[in-house]
Amino acid sequence: MHSDRSDSFDADADVDGQQAPDPAEAAFDALVDFAIRKIPEPFADQLYTVAFVVEDEPAPGQTPPGQLLLGLYTGVPRTAWGVDNAAIPSKISIFRGPHERLYRDPEARRRAVEETVFHEVAHHFGITDERLRQLQASRARPNRG
């Protein structure tokens, strides 16, 4: 008797034949979701036009030579005129692979994901990398008041 039905069994597939979610991917997605929820209200309210996505790795050509890209903002910053009607939607990509390679400790990874999300959100609000470095340096200096 001949049958078109396969008798093989895929332990990673669920009932509908879909792949079961990777626990590491789900855990990383949860870190990103948690970081997004920590964005303070005045800013969170203005992120309705931004898509947050988790990607495994940056696409070829996205990472500057000699650097490790943890996140990427693409779009028109809110400081640009007419941002609400921009032809290109804003997108923040958080890259799982580089975070996992650089931050093996779960707590360090959580902090790094939060910093990356906040960094990319800052770009959405028009803050440059140079200005972010200045702000970080001023936070690192002790308050001598």
Image: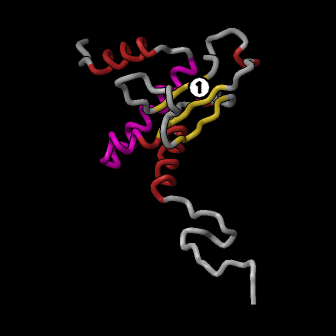
Decide which of 101, 89 is in the foreground and name it.
101
Instruction: Give coordinates of residue 141: x percent, y percent.
Output: 26, 17
Q: Vertical placement of 68 versus 142: above or below?
A: below
Decide which of 140, 78 is in the foreground and name it.
78
**Residue pictured at 61% horizontal, 12% vertical:** 79
Dividing the picture into quadrants, the one containing residue 14 is: bottom right
The magenta stretch spans which residues? 98-125
- Left or right: 131 in relation to 105: right
| The stretch drawn in magenta includes residue 109 | yes
**Residue pictured at 31% horizontal, 16% vertical:** 137
Predominant SS along the magenta part = helix
Dividing the picture into quadrants, the one containing residue 99 is: top left
| The stretch drawn in magenta includes residue 31 | no
Q: Circle 1 is placed at which residue position? A: 42
Q: How is the model colour-coded?
A: secondary structure
**Residue pictured at 55% horizontal, 25% vertical:** 73
Please, what is the three-letter code of the amino acid marked with disc 1? Pro
